[in-house]
Image (spheres, coloured by chain):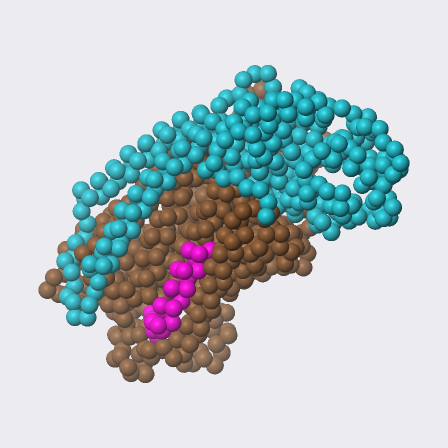
Chain colours: A cyan, B brown
Amino acid sequence: MTGSSGSIFSPVSPEAHAITSLFIITLCICAVIFAVVAGLVGYSLARYRWRKGDPDPAQVAGNKRMEIVWTAIPFVIVLALFGLTVRAMEQADPAPPPGGPDLDVIGHQWWWEVRSPKLGYVTANEIHIPVGKDFLVRLDTTDVLHEFWVPQLGRKMTTLPGAGNEIWLRADEPGIYEGACTEFCGTEHAWMRVEVIAESQEKYLAWVHEQQQAALPVQGEAARGREDFLTMTCVNCHAIKGVGGTENAGPDLTHVASRRYLAGRLLPNTPANLRRWLTNPQAVKQGALMPNFKLTPAQVGDLAAYFEALK
Amino acid sequence: MSAIPGSPTAIAPEILTADEQAHWKLAWISTVDHKRIGVLYLLFALVFFVAGGLEALCMRLQLAVPNNTLVSPDAFNALFTMHGTTMIFLVAMPALFGFANYFVPLMIGARDMAFPRLNALSVWLVPLGGALLHFSIFVGVPKVGWFAYAPLSETPYNPELGVDYWIVALLVLGIGSVATAINLIATTLSLRAPGMTMKRVPLFVWINFVTAFIVVFALPVLNAALVMLLMDRRLGTHFFAGHHGGSPVLWQHIFWAFGHPEVYILALPAFAIISEIVPVFSRKPIFGYEFVALSSVAIAFMSFAVWAHHMFTVGMGHAAETFFVIASMLIAIPTGVKVLNWSATMFRGRIRTSVPMLYAIAFLLQFTLGGLSGITHASAALDWQTKNSYYLVAHFHYVAVGGIVFAILGAVHYWFPKISGRMLSERLGRWTFWCMVVGFNATFAIQHILGFEGMPRRVYTYPDFPNWGWMNLLSTAGACVMGVAAILLVINLLVSLRRGAPAGDNPWDAWTLEWATTSPPAVHNFDALPPIRSRRPLWDLANPDRPDPPVGGDAIRPLNKFKCSMWTLIASEAAFFGTLLLVFAWFNLRPPAGPNATNSLDLMKTGWFSVCLFASSFTLWRAEVAERAKRRRGMEGWLALTIALGAVFIVGQGSEYLGLDRHGVNVGTNLFASSFYLVTGFHGFHVIAGLIALTTLLVMLLAGDYRRWRPPLEAIGLYWHFVDIVWVFVLATVYILPRLLS
C-alpha cells in the first residue's frame, strides 16, 4: 500500500476549497430531491399495492397546478445552483495576472515534463512548490491531448498543443499530493501520474538550488556509465545538464536520482528498479517510447551507477 | 379477431406462419414486415449486448486488484473502445429502434411502416456496421475511446486500420439510423388510423417521433466529423491534427454536438417505454400526458444547446462555460417533470409489481440518481474536479445502464408476450431483476467514491492506494452478478419461447392498440380496429360505462409519405452541410497562409456554372408544371434540360478542380484547400446523386413505365431544389464572404 490518493473532499488550496464547498451544498440538494422522488415511489408502493380483485382506482389523468409547481421549484433550485456555480468558478479559477507562468508543465506520452522558465530548472513527473504560494502553471503537450489533475489542489485542465491553458497550483499544507493524466492519451495512460510536493520555503529553495546545478562529476563505475550515456543512443532522447544530450524527447536526467519515482510513478526510484528499467523498459511499462536496447548487465550496472550519482 | 385463449391458434410460439417454417431463413432475411424487422433489431442488439458485456467483464477483471497484469494495456484500451462503441451504436440504438419499429405502427393502427423496404435496408445496416467494426480485429482494434479524440485518433498515433474501420462502421450505422428516423416520422405523420389524432397517440409514439427528429439532425453532424477524420487519416488533410493548424478542439465541438443529442436519442425512447409501463401497472392513465409529451419536445430542442458541457476542461473561457452551465442545468427541468409525472402516476394507483413494473421502478430511482449526478457535471466548477474520473463513469452508467438498459429490459418483459405469444417466466424474471439491481448498484455506486478519491477513467491499472483495492474488487464482483443476470435473461427468453404459458391478446390488461390484436399479431396486424376516441381505446372498450373523456376532434390529416420523408431527408442534409460550412468558416474567417479563397478561387467562372445550376431549378419547376398538366412531352423536355444544366455545373466544377490542381492546390495543401474540397466535393456528390435520380426518371418516362410505377417527381424535385439552395450558401460562405472580409 502506498500513500493517500488524495480526495476532492480534503482540499488544501482556496481554489479546491471553493469547489469542495459547492460540492457539499450540491450533494445536499441532490439528496433532498432524491428523497422526495424515492419517498413518493416508496410510499405509493407501500400504500397502493394491487391485490387480487381490487377494482381499478380513480382515473386521474393529471393536474395542471401540480405540473406548474413541480416545474417552478426545480427552476428556482437550478437558478440558485447556477449562481453558486458562477461564484465558485471565479474562486476556483481566478484570471491569471500578466507576467507569465511560474512553471511550464508539458505532457508527453507518457510522462510530464516540468520546466521553470524563471528559475531555469527542468525535471519530470514531480512538481515542487513552496507552501502557501500561488503558482501559475502553463500547460502544453508535444503530442496528443493530456489532462492535468491533482484533486486536492483544484481543477483539472486539458493540455492543448500551443500552450493555451493555464491553471493555479497552491497548497496551504506541506505534503505530497497525488495527481494523474485524466484524458486518455494512449497505451500507458494509466502510468502518466504526477506528484506535487509542497514544502517549506527553505526546503523548496534548497531543492531549487540543487536542481539548478549542472550534473556532478563522477568517477569509476559511474564514469563508465557517463561514457555509455554519451556514446550510446541515450543522448538522442535524454539530456543531462553540463554533459549533453537532447532536450524534451525523454525526461531530463540531470538530477534523476533526486526523484521519488521512475516511469510516471510506476516504480519507486531505487537502484534495483533503475536496473530493472534499464534492462528492459518494455517489460516494466509496455508501450513506453523507450525501446529495449538489450544492454549488457555490465552496461546496465554502469548506467545505473551513473544515474544513482545524479542527485 | 382475437382467438380463444388456450386454443392452438392462440398459442403461436413461432412468429412465422406455417408455410414459412419450411424456408425460415429466407423468410427472415427477405422480410420487409415491420414486426419481423423489429425482432431482427432486438436479436442483433442481444448478440452485441453479449459481446459488449463480455468486454466489460474483461475490463472489470483486470481492474479487480491493483497493479494487475491479466490484460495488456493495449488490449484494455481496445476493450473500452469497443465496449463503448458497441453498447451505444450496436446495442442501445438497435434495441430501441427495434421496439419503435415493432410498436409504433401497431400503436397507431397501421399495417406497416411507411417504407418497408427502406426499413429492411436500415436493419441490415446494423450487422453490416457491426461486422465492419469487428473486422478491425484482424488489422488492429481501435484504441481511442468511443469519442476518438484527435490527435490521438490521427495516423501518427494510431496508424493501424482499426480506427478507419471504426469510422466506416459508424458511418454505415449513422446512415441506417437516419433512414429509420425518416421512416418513423413518415409513418407517424402519414399512416395513423382514423381517429388516431396526434393528441391521442400513445406517449410511446409521441416520444419516439420526437426522438426521430433528434436522430435526423444529430447523426449527420457525426457523419461530417467522421468523414473529416477519415480525410485526415487517408487523404493527408489536417482538420484535427493540432500541429499544422488543425484543431483538436473542433473535433470535440463537432463530436459532442452529435454526442449529447445522442444521449437523448437513447434516453427519450427509454422514457417512452416507461411512460407505457408505469400507467398499465398502476392501473391509471399517465399523469400529465401533455406535459410528458411537451417536455420531450423541450428536451429535443435543448439537447442541441448543451454539448460543450463535455468540454469544461479544454479552456473555452468562463463566458462560454457559463452559457453551457445554465443550458445543461435547465435541461434537467423537463427531465425532472417526467420523473415526477411517473411517480404521480403510481400515486393512488393499484400497483402490480410484475417484472416489467419492477424494472420501471428501478429505472425511476436509478435514473434519478444518474440525473442528479448529471447536475453536478453541468456545474462547470464541480466538473473541473470530477470530469474524466470514475465519478463520471458512475454517472453515465447510472443513466445508460440504470436508466436505459433497465427500461429496455422492462420493455422486453412487457412486450415479449405480444411478440412471441408466450409469457416469460415470472419467477426467473424476478431472479434476473434482483441480480441485475444488486449487481448494477454494487458495480457502479462505489465508483462515485473512487472518482472522489482521484481514480481517472480509462486506466488499465492503478497504484495500490488506500481503499482503491477493495472498492474496485466490489465493483468487479457486482459486474459478475450482472453477468449472472444476463445469463438468466437469455435462459428465460429461450425457454419461454418454447414452453411459456400462452399469453392471449392482452395479458397485462393494457390499453393501447397493440394489445387489440393477436399475440403475435397477424402479418396484416389488425382485422378490425376498435373505435379510437381517447388515448386509451382498449380502456373505453373494456369500460363502456366509464370511458375516458374524448380528446379533441376525430379528424386526422394524414400527410403524403413521400413528401414527409423528403422534407425530413432535407433537414438531415441541411444539418450535414451546415456542419461543413461551419467548418469552412472556422478555418477561413482568418485566411490561412498559402492558397486561400481570395487568391485561389475564380468567382467569375464559378458564377457562370452556378447560374446553370440555379436555372436548373427553374426548368425542373417547369417539368413539375408539365406533369401536373399531364403534358408528357413537356415533362420529358424540361427534365432533359434540367439534367443538361446539372451536367454543365458538374463539368464546370470539375474544370475548377483541375485548374486548382494544376496550381498545386490539392486536398492536403492547407486548411483552406481541405475545407474547400470538403464543402464543394460533398455538394458535387449530391448534384450527381440528383442527376442519377432525374435520369432514371427520364428513362422511365421515355420507356413508358412512368404511369405504372409513379415515383413522385415532386419529391425528387424537392431534393433538387434543396441541392441548389445549398449551393447558394456554399457560394456565399466559400466564395463571397472571404472576399468581403479580406
Which sits in the foreground, B676 or B328? Answer: B328
Q: Is residue B585 left or right of residue B286?
A: right
Indicate the quadrant containing the C terminus of chain B: top left, top right, bottom left or bottom right: top right
Q: Is residue B359 visible?
A: yes
Q: Is residue B660 visible?
A: no
Q: Is residue B647 above or below residue B538?
A: above
Q: Which residues are magenta?
A: B416-443
Residue positioned 34% across, 40% down in the render = A28
Q: Is residue B600 left or right of residue A59?
A: right
Task: Judge whether residue B432 is colored magenta.
Answer: yes
Which sits in the foreground, B210 or B280? Answer: B280
Locate residue B149, reporting x and y percent: 58, 42
Q: Is residue A38 above or below residue B313?
A: below
Q: Is residue A239 above or below residue B69?
A: above
Q: Is residue B260 above or below residue B418?
A: above
Q: Residue furthest left?
A: B545
Q: Residue furthest top?
A: A99
Residue positioned 44% across, 73% down in the render = B491
Q: Is residue B510 left or right of residue A299?
A: left
Locate residue B191, reporting x and y percent: 32, 58
Q: Main secondary structure of the magenta part?
A: helix
Count of numbered labels shown in the rendering: 0
Locate residue A282, reporting x and y percent: 74, 49
Locate residue B11, reporting x and y percent: 33, 79
Residue positioned 75% across, 32% down in the render = A311
Residue positioned 35% across, 33% down in the render = A81
Find residue B488 and report its image quarter.
Answer: bottom left
Indicate the quadrant containing the N terminus of chain B: top left, top right, bottom left or bottom right: bottom left
Task: Judge whether residue B270 is colored magenta.
Answer: no
Which sits in the foreground, B49 or A124? Answer: A124
Q: Residue furthest bottom?
A: B8
